[in-house]
Image (tube, rainbow, N blue to C red):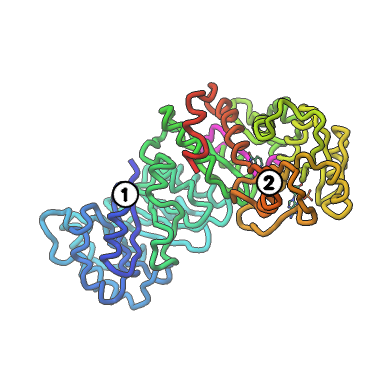
Amino acid sequence: MSKICLSLTAKTIARDLEILEKYRAWADMAELRVDCLDQDERFYIRRFPALAGIPVILSIRRSVDGGEFTKGEGARIVLFSKGLAFAEVDQRRNFGYLDLEEDVDAPGLLEVSRAFGTKIIRSFYNLKGVDDDLPVRIRSLRQSGDEIAKVVVTPRTLEDMLKVYRAAAETTDAEKIITCRGDFGANAQILAERLGSHLSYCSIKGENDVTSASDVQLDPKELVETFRFRNITKNTKVFAVTGFPLKVAISPRFYNRVFSIEEIDAVYLPVPADSFDSMIRLADDIGIAGISVTVPYKEAVIPYLSWESQRVKLTGACNTLIAAEQGWMGYNTDARGFAGSILSFTGLKNLKGKKITIVGTGGAARAVTAVVSQLMGRALILNRTVVKARSLAALYGFSWGGLDSQGFKMMKRYSDIIIQATPVGMEGRPDEDPLDFYQFTGKEQVMDLIYQPEKTRCLRRAEEAGCKIINGSDMLLRQARYQYRYFIGKEFPPSLVDRVGLNEIV
Ligand code: NAP
């Protein structure tokens, strides 16, 4: 079973121990990054394993490998020796592992380690990308049968991650550790067991004294509590959410919480995809059972479908993929999620007589427009690229315009309800507002489909003007309950509707 290893990168041993204490419940072992310690602290590393009380890796990472150690190799070997000196018979008081790079030739260290039961990890770092010959690397790293090979790579694209998963599949017989640095690698951290990685390194954002020391994204608490790391086996069903850039927090918490309560052997992970084509190949390769599709792929996904639901046909957008024997089946649960959310928000049974502005023409806006039409509302579609507003509006006999003064004039006649359905104002670009030309009167009911941040600039302006507002999290949860049915093959348990609501998971 893959273990969770907390990488400790503080400047003092006391601080490392403080961090370990805080996260002890979720860590199986620790890595003492001696290179991050202040000079005078390095004299005391020998006592660390006894103080830590869990197996510890002794690691002194060189600057060339992304570490903080800048002195010569001689000084580093002396430091390693300090860590291994005066070995005790009780092995728990010795370092459990010694992390040496592939080019280190220090027979004395190896001899002492073996004599006292300290395992050797043989490391290779690629701080710029992922090697094409990664399986060869993994196999050739170990200098004797009792060593563990460790590769630290830096995926820059999802295609790089595909190389990592394939390398893992080709080296199932090798004892190894695989660590993927950066945003693309978080799913590998969660799926360490599937990768056959001996352990999954974690670090704590905000608690690293040395920020460059943090290779990985998730902390041990997130791994265990959100992503159920300790329950993942080779048989666990894998679901994913994909988009780019991918900033999702609600849906992984929602699904993993429900899987946990319902005791379903499944995990739901974020997989940022800079190319949807790579996503589909990765999903096929590692056997992903279902995918939630988000910005900007809801339309781009359609050519990959072997079957599409009526709602996908109607809206031209798909947010749910299910792996089937004949290929990927596509559904759209945004439409139903939006319908439930808008009716509950307005307190109406339908939108008859309501004049509504819809901003955007992407996947989300397409689902919104179809629902507004079905619920008998009348809409004005506004879009940056006016020609797209015109063609979407034409499908339903709605009005259309641009995001400009002309659009502003038209909006005055379509202002009972305003629905913002573009990604403008999302986390990362919080100062943007696609309706900055429009002054809210306070009478409009305003819905922004974005849920991160909780209130976009547009929504804050509407609230300040006195409008009734709602963000997209209610819609997200509603659509997720429908998506659950496609993922798991049974209805979302009604008893969980309140139990796994926003208050519980945000
Ligand atoms: P999308 O396909 O990427 O959206 C494209 C639309 O956004 C187009 O109309 C595009 O205009 C417009 N747009 C993009 N950048 C713009 C800019 N700088 N200024 C003006 N318009 C801009 O995304 P989507 O999948 O439709 O999703 C849209 C939003 O809804 C996202 O924030 C997503 O998170 C949210 N959403 C929420 C839920 C939920 O359950 N709450 C469900 C689905 C989506 P052009 O045509 O001119 O390029």
Identified by mark 2, the residue type is: Pro
**Residue at point 39% right, 61% down?**
207
Q: Quadrant of residue 15?
A: bottom left
| SS of the residue under disc 2 | loop
Horizontal relation, residue 224 to residue 432: left or right: left
Indicate if the residue with disc 2 has its beta carbon within 8 Å of ligand 1: yes
Q: Residues within 10 Å of mark 1 (few under 14, many from 20)?
A: many
Disc number for residue 296:
2
Split into 4 quadrants, where in the image is the N terminus?
top left
Q: Is residue 143 visible?
A: no
Front-most of residues 51 and 285: 51
Is 434 contained in the magenta span? no
- Where is residue 145? Give x, y as percent: 28, 51
Q: Is residue 335 above or below residue 440?
A: above
- The mark that comes first in sequence, 2 or 1, is 1
- Where is residue 32? Give x, y as percent: 30, 62
Looking at the image, the residue that sits furthest to the top is 490
Q: Residues within 10 Å of mark 2 (few under 14, many from 20)?
A: some
What is the span of residues highlighted in magenta in the rendered image?
A: 284-300
Horizontal relation, residue 291 to residue 79: left or right: right
Q: Which residue is mark 1?
A: 27
Tell me whether the residue at label 2 lies in contact with that at label 1, contact meaning CB atoms closer than 8 angstroms: no
Front-most of residues 164 and 486: 486
| SS of the residue under disc 1 | loop
- Where is residue 305? Give x, y as percent: 68, 32
- Where is residue 368? Give x, y as percent: 73, 36
Q: Tell me the CA gap for discs 2 and 1.
A: 36 Å
Disc number for residue 368:
none
